[in-house]
């Protein structure tokens, strides 16, 4: 058996290993910084146009860490005809508040050996069944590009006795693409908000190999939260916002529960989360600190994990940095309700 054939067998083995894990979506700690990734119904669910950049570096102490980069934009549109702009329209009971969003995410594994790039186009529509409630529906269409770059792999025959790497592998990588659909529902009433989303309705193929294929299973997400002003009974109008949240995610046999809260005072936001695998063999704590005013948002979060064999510390740590801008609409003659949502 020649060396090239051995390399091909090794590469096929790697693909089978990754395919046995099925497709997995990138996970972010600041889940509400770009809520359209959590639930497409949040597109246009803000009083401002939003532009966000997010970068995540995961398992930083290993030789081949994971890194994820994303850009997002969303805004709202009002397609309401003039003849409907009467009393009931001003009450926003029948307001046509359509939203548009776009997400671009690049997930890189193993220093570029495996990478997935996705682009989501989102349309949402919202209405108010009552004066103090708001409901939105979202539809997401996605393009997925999966790349295998085997040129960065190092095989045993490429290493000389002194430890230097010589030459390049003869195995050629490839790029595949697919499309997908997701749906979402979100709403709020009084101080409470939440929603439900289904991603990967089409279960697109992630990879093909001899004797089978790997696909991305459907992902179900349920989230609920609330906002409470802890200084509500003070004489002066001070606000210390306490926002507890619960997020449950199921994807095939994978179940994850995120429980946490945010504290917001003026422009400063701090959060503490527990991300729990329901098999109770992985526990992650997330600390978030951010600044958010009328125009800018900037946040940082740090993750550290506790596995079955105890605290892993730095080898399992993750860093996430976010930067966002809010752009106010030039003309805003009427007031509309928007779904409540944490900023990070």
Image (tube, rainbow, N blue to C red):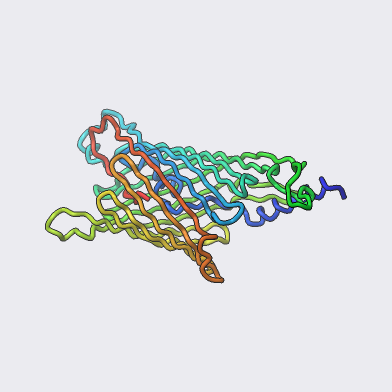
Q: Residue furthest right?
A: 1
Name the foreground residue: 154 vs 263. Answer: 154
Indicate the position of residue 119 as horizontal and vertical percent values: 52, 39
Residue 336 found in image quarter: top left
**Residue 127 in view of the camera:** yes
Name the foreground residue: 180 vs 102. Answer: 102
Residue 242 found in image quarter: bottom left
Q: Name which residue lies at 32% across and 51% down.
A: 188
**Residue 205 in view of the camera:** no
Compared to residue 234, the image places residue 130 above or below, namely above
Indicate the position of residue 26 as horizontal and vertical percent values: 53, 50
Indicate the position of residue 233 as horizontal and vertical percent values: 16, 60
Q: Residue furthest top?
A: 82
Q: How many marks?
A: 0
Q: Name which residue lies at 49% across and 61% down.
A: 256
Indicate the position of residue 62 as horizontal and vertical percent values: 59, 56
Residue 50 found in image quarter: top left
Q: Name which residue lies at 32% across and 43% down.
A: 127
Q: Residue furthest front?
A: 162
Compared to residue 184, the image places residue 307 above or below, namely below
Q: Residue furthest left?
A: 235
Q: Name which residue lies at 42% across and 38% down.
A: 73
Name the foreground residue: 133 vs 330. Answer: 330
Q: Is residue 11 left or right of residue 99?
A: right
């Amino acid at each position: 058996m020649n060396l090239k054939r051995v390399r091909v067998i090794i590469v096929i083995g790697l693909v089978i290993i990754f395919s046995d894990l099925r497709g997995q979506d990138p996970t972010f700690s600041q889940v509400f910084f770009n809520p359209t990734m959590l639930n497409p119904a949040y597109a246009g669910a803000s009083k401002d146009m939003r532009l966000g950049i997010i970068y995540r570096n995961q398992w930083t102490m290993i030789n081949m860490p994971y890194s994820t980069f994303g850009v997002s934009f969303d805004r709202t549109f009002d397609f309401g005809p003039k003849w409907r702009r009467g009393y009931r329209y001003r009450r926003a009971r029948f307001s046509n508040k359509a939203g548009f969003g776009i997400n671009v995410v690049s997930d890189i594994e193993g220093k570029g050996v495996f990478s997935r790039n996705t682009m989501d186009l989102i349309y949402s529509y919202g209405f108010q069944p009552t004066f103090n409630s708001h409901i939105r529906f979202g539809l997401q269409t996605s393009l997925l590009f999966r790349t295998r770059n085997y040129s960065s792999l190092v095989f045993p025959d490429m290493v000389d006795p002194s430890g230097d790497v010589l030459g390049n592998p003869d195995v050629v990588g490839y790029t595949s693409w697919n499309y997908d659909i997701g749906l979402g529902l979100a709403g709020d009433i009084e101080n409470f908000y939440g929603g439900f989303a289904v991603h990967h309705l089409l279960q697109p193929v992630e990879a093909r190999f001899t004797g089978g294929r790997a696909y991305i299973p459907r992902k179900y997400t349920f989230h609920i939260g609330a906002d409470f002003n802890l200084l509500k009974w003070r004489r002066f109008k001070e606000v210390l916002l306490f926002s507890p949240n619960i997020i449950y995610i199921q994807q095939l046999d994978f179940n994850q529960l995120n429980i946490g809260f945010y504290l917001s005072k003026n422009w400063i936001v701090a959060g503490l989360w527990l991300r729990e695998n329901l098999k109770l063999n992985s526990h992650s704590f997330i600390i978030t600190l951010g600044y958010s005013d009328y125009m800018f948002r900037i946040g940082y979060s740090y993750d550290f994990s506790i596995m079955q064999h105890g605290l892993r510390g730095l080898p399992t740590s993750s860093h996430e940095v976010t930067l966002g801008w809010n752009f106010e609409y030039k003309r805003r003659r009427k007031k509309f309700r928007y779904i409540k949502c944490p900023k990070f």
